Image (cartoon, rainbow, N blue to C red):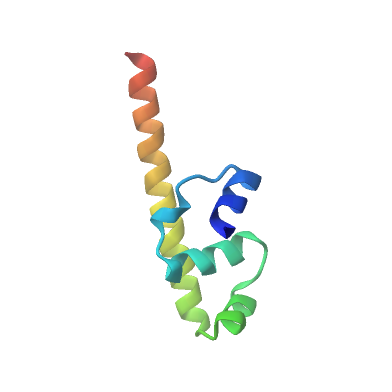
């Protein structure tokens, strides 16, 4: 499965929180494709790709911050 391979290789966890429409452009961007290339591959407008990558980064960032907060709370107890 692509998700588990990426998680294993890059230490990324819980990317399954993203829906496919956000996951795929984000992963392509993470792999080094630019927005134009991703738009061509996925047959989407460039603006749509940019928005989906931006939203995916926001979701992942929020989850990461929540994880850090939870970890700090457990560590301090």
If the image is split into quadrants, where does the C terminus sit?
A: top left
In which quadrant is the N terminus drawn? bottom right
Q: Among all residues in the image, which is located at the extreme top?
A: 77
Question: In front: 20, or 1?
Answer: 1
73 sits to left or right of 15: left
Q: In this view, does 66 lie above or below 35?
A: above
Q: Where is residue 12 in the image (x, y as percent from the top left)?
A: 54, 46
Residue placed furthest toward the front: 1
Number of callouts: 0
Residue at 58% x, 59% y is: 2
Residue 52: image location, x then y, percent: 44, 69
In the image, what residue occupies the spot 43% across and 51% down?
60
Image side of residue 63 versus residue 49, left or right: left
Q: At x 50% / y 44%, what residue is drawn?
A: 13
List x then y, in percent, for residue 21.
44, 71
Q: Is residue 77 above or below residue 34?
A: above
| Residue at horizontal 38 percent and vertical 45 percent from the top | 63
Q: Is residue 34 left or right of residue 46?
A: right
């Amino acid at each position: 499965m692509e998700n588990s391979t990426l998680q294993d290789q890059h230490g990324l966890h819980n990317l399954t929180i993203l829906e496919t429409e956000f996951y795929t452009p984000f992963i392509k961007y993470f792999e080094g494709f630019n927005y134009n290339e991703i738009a061509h591959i996925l047959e989407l407008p460039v603006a749509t790709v940019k928005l989906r990558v931006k939203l995916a980064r926001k979701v992942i960032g929020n989850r990461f911050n929540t994880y850090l907060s939870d970890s700090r709370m457990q560590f301090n107890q």
